[in-house]
Image (cartoon, rainbow, N blue to C red):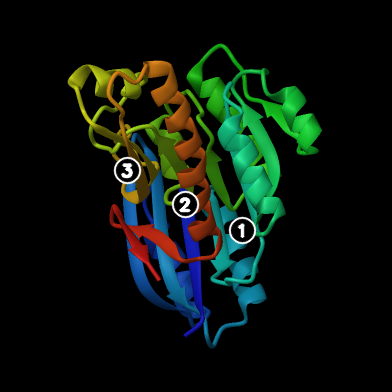
Amino acid sequence: MKLATITVAGPDRPGIIAKTTTTLFENGVNIVSLDEKVVNGIFSMVLAADVSKVNFEKLAKELQRCAKDLDLEIRAKLHDTREVKNLAILVTREPRCLEEIVRNCENGKIRAKPVVIIGNRPELKDLAAKLEIPFQLADGASKEEREKKMVAILKRFNADFVALARFMQILSPEFVARFEGRVINIHPSLLPAFPGARPYDQALEAGVEIVGVTAHFVTTDLDRGPVICQDAFRVKKNEPIEKIRERGQKLEAKVLTRACELYSKDKLYMQWGKVHFR
């Protein structure tokens, strides 16, 4: 079986499923699974399709015509563990996760090329230049304006997936719906415990002896997307919060790198709110 993932995203309107699936049927595609939803007026659909007997280039062109007729976005990607994916990295101020991801892309552990670094603040622009990766500032007076810029940047750089490298901004349901199953986040907690902005402080205040980090797919539920991988360490007696935070940040970079590696090599995917491993 030769599999492809087809994603559809855009403003909700009647006939999207019918027209898209008809186009697939007319091109000899067998739909293996289909997951669709509407969030705040944004329609998203992810299909797994058997394209073993299909002229894939012709199918891709037909789907682009379909997308134009429906005024939305359709992407068709073959499952190819040898393919080098285009990776976009979203950042704010902290450099550790960004540097670790780029280093592991360069050494081949993550099978991806970092095509753009997008910041909601300019602090890491110089680091991006040092890493020789384009930096794009997604600023604006409103969340809608900032996310509109991010969507345009991701389309322009043809990003296959997105890593949130300690990106300290909550993404809207509309943004998440457009990139369903393609956005990976790292959270400094063994989720669902201690979500939010101060997880290490919360853990210390609660007296926990083991703290950790969670890499997960981003969904419309804040910090509650399906878990990809986790790791943890034991807190030493009377260990200061600064030391705990330092150890946690090293682990964050390691676990986010692991999640990006698995995704880049097509070893997992998200469907129906769960992570499935191949």
- In the picture, the quarter occupied by the C terminus is bottom left
Which residue appears farthest toward the top when viewing the image? 141
CA–CA distance between discs 2 and 3? 13 Å
Q: Residue 208 in the image: state x and y as whole percent.
A: 21, 28
Residue in front for this viewpoint, 32 or 137: 137
CA–CA distance between discs 3 and 1? 24 Å
CA–CA distance between discs 1 and 2? 11 Å
**Image quadrant assignment for residue 209:** top left
Q: Which residue sits at x=32%, y=43%?
A: 225
Secondary structure state at the residue bearing disc 3: loop
State how many labels appear. 3
Q: Give the residue number, with chain letter if any, for mark 3.
A: 225
Which residue appears farthest toward the bottom when viewing the image? 53
Q: Is residue 74 above or below residue 167?
A: below
Residue 109: assigned label? 1
**Image quadrant assignment for residue 42:** top left
Q: Between disc 2 and disc 3, whose residue precedes? A: 3
Mark in the foreground, 1 or 2: 1
Q: Residue 129 in the image: state x and y as whole percent.
A: 80, 31
Residue 259: assigned label? 2
Q: Is residue 246 above or below residue 259?
A: above
Q: Is residue 222 above or below residue 82?
A: above
- For label 1, the crowd category at 10 Å Cα-Cα, with few meaning under 14, some 14 to 19 and many 20 or more, is some
Q: Between disc 3 and disc 1, whose residue precedes? A: 1
Secondary structure state at the residue bearing disc 2: helix
- For label 3, the crowd category at 10 Å Cα-Cα, with few meaning under 14, some 14 to 19 and many 20 or more, is many
Q: Give the amino acid at mark 3.
A: Gly
